[in-house]
Amino acid sequence: MAITEVIRQKAAKRIIGHIQGKVQGPTMVFFGGIHGNEPSGVEALQEVFKEFETHSISVKGSMYGILGNMPALFQKQRFLARDLNRLWTKPEIERIQTLAKDQKTPEDEELLELLELLNTILENETGPFYFIDFHTTSSRTLPFITINDAMINRKFAKLFPVPIILGIEEYLEGPLLSYINTKGYLSLGFESGQHFTEEARINTVAFIWLSLQYSGFLKEAHVANEVDHYAQLQSAARHNRNFYEVIERYALEPEDKFSMKPGFESFGKIEKNTLLASHNGNTVHASQSGILFMPLYQTLGGEGFFIVRLIPKSILRISAYVRKIKADRLLTLLPGVSWADASKERLMVNLKVARFFSKAFFHLMGFRNRVVDKTHILMNNREKTAKNEMYEDSTWY
């Protein structure tokens, strides 16, 4: 069943476009402009929907293009009061829902409208569901994908000829896609390039068409050939389709004065002690050698930069295997490791007892950590909630 007419009218300004096929198939949900200074996703979606209007293209399922932070997009600001892509946690959503009208920030209002639209799509459409969120970065970068490390995300992301980043959810609180992942649905973020550049828009257009092709939404290859879209991303990514893992985040507070030194790009190698930035009048040097990721060249943002490292293919294969045989069931036999709740979706790790187990060990099993206190970390497992059965008939699964 298509989205209800009542919600369609209410959300008319937020919906960039909506296509309903006559044959059952996947439900594709694309978000653009969750950050208001990142319009490339919106522009790309508008272009793709116009293509559907002017050409007869056979489809299966449904497709939505959704605007994110509309007031911020209008002002070309990342956000007006709060970062909309850091609010999507259960406690924060529940808190916002209790606020009086005059207590809500613009981003609180945007979250509630998006949440209502998201829930309505899930209630009225059939799966499999694909959620894709488009972003750009303040620095020059290769296009890349970010995912929470569930195998459905990893398998689908591998189809695209761009780098894939794992583990960022350990360092960011409340992204939209992490919230969707807790529901068990496939979701990924695509960072198409630098803010306000033509290349970012072109890369996003290519990514949309490939997503529609790989998911089975398109009944046949689109006239603007799949090979061309693939080649566009492959060239923009300089043939880099490696997996990387985030190993460090340089955190900022809203009142901080941070200035990245000029000339840095994402995926550039750095050596330990490299001068990277100034922060509140102090110099910032790299704490370790690695690969620089998303250096900040804008005034708003909670991260000055990240450092990532390459994940060997052998580790990825081992990781996939131990998840396939559900080896995580044995983890609570280890000292200092216990289930955090009856659902057995989260582990509590006592660092005093289990300090000899590295984070990388738990990452193999699909667990990502959140610090509880100085001696305990909570490990969340995306595999436990992933709705694998929804995607198992897909050609890419």
Image: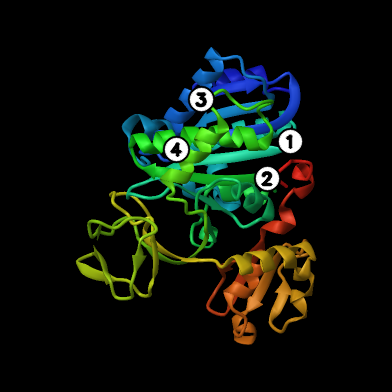
Q: Nearer the viewer, residue 41 or 271?
A: 271
Q: Residues within 10 Å of mark 3 (few under 14, many from 20)?
A: some
For mark 3, give the secondary structure. helix
The residue identified by callout 3 is 48
Mark sitting on residue 127:
1
Q: Residue at x 59, y 25 (%)?
A: 222
Mark sitting on residue 185:
2
- Amino acid carrying mark 4 in the image: Asn
Q: Residue 54 appears at what percent x and percent y? A: 53, 13
For mark 1, give the secondary structure. loop
Contact? badges 2 and 3 (CB < 8 Å):
no
For mark 4, give the secondary structure. helix
Q: Residue 27 appears at what percent x and percent y? A: 67, 32
Observer-side mark, 3 or 1, equals: 3
Q: Earlier in the sequence, mark 3 or mark 4?
A: 3
Q: Residue at x 56, y 68 (%)?
A: 312
Q: Nearer the viewer, residue 57 or 16?
A: 57
Q: Is residue 388 left or right of residue 220?
A: right
Q: Nearer the viewer, residue 101 or 249?
A: 249
The residue identified by callout 4 is 203
Task: Give the distance between the C-alpha atoms of the residues marked 3 and 1, in whole angstroms.
Answer: 22 Å
Q: Earlier in the sequence, mark 4 or mark 1?
A: 1
Task: Give the distance between the C-alpha atoms of the residues marked 3 and 4, in whole angstroms.
Answer: 12 Å
